[in-house]
Image (spheres, grey):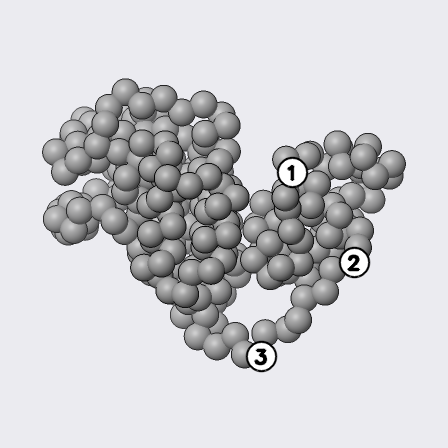
Amino acid sequence: MIDLIEFIHATNDAKDSPGLTACLTAFLGGFELDRFVLEEIKARSAPYNGNKPFGAISTYPAAWREWYAAKGYAEHDPVYRMCLTTFRPFTWEEALIEYRSAASERIMTEAAEFGLRSGVGLMVHAPRGLLVGFGFASPETGLRFDMSDLSLLRSAAYHFCHVYADLAADDRSDAPVVSLTDREREVLLWAAAGKTKAQIADLLVVGESCVKRHCENAFRKLEVNTLPFAVAKAIRLGLIHPI
């Protein structure tokens, strides 16, 4: 079991997908989650370097993955369907309530038979405009996740996606060097500390529009489209160093 900061450092040092998988599995242990799956949901822009960087990574039982695909369960899977409609993390219980049907209940019942009894789902904006869905699973029932738990899981998912995209890229030798201004780094550091744009504006004694402009400039340089991903990539590239 490792905390978020340890997770970030460990994934930054990972050399391959198995290494990343081990890091995420260790992090999930702190939430009584022991398995995960991530897979590209859909692309909002051109594929990354002509290829999909997010082939499925999964520690779910292979038999369940094969059964799920053979049955075409994605159409009725409440977790998958909720990933398509919300960017906030959610529990499987919430997803089943939102998309309850005989088919969705059957899917969740069968998943439990494979040791996937409860969990959390979420979707993140990945590099190059891709949308990637995550499922975190536990063999236990009755697990409870508060907002802090869900926020930590989402932060880990964003960082995992970024590191994985870097490792999956075919050729990064000609990648441009990213250079942030002192103010852009300062904004991202405060964001990494959990501050909102309004709070950052107060801390820097500037208008919120000024903070938004610094964020937009950082997004453009880092080739991302959300603040969590900007923070994750800046940490990954060594541009900021949160304590």
Secondary structure at badge 3 equals loop
Q: Would you call the spot at circle 3 few (<14 residues within 10 Å), some (14-19), or many (20 or more)?
A: few
Q: Is residue 165 above or below residue 243?
A: below
Q: Which residue is mark 2?
A: 181
Q: Is residue 50 visible?
A: no
Q: Would you call the spot at circle 2 few (<14 residues within 10 Å), some (14-19), or many (20 or more)?
A: few
Q: Earlier in the sequence, mark 2 or mark 1?
A: 2
Q: Would you call the spot at circle 1 few (<14 residues within 10 Å), some (14-19), or many (20 or more)?
A: few
> Is residue 183 or residue 238 the one in the foreground?
238
Marks 2 and 1 in Cβ contact (< 8 Å):
no
The alpha-carbon separation of the residues under discs 2 and 3 comes to 22 Å
Task: Tell me, for residue 70, which label it has, or none.
Answer: none
Looking at the image, which residue is at 75% across and 48% down?
A: 186
Q: Quadrant of the N terminus?
A: top left
Amino acid type assigned to the residue bearing label 3 in the image: Asp
Amino acid type assigned to the residue bearing label 2 in the image: Thr
Q: Position of residue 32 (x, y in %)?
A: 31, 31
Q: Of circles 1 and 3, which is in front?
A: 1
Secondary structure at badge 2 equals loop
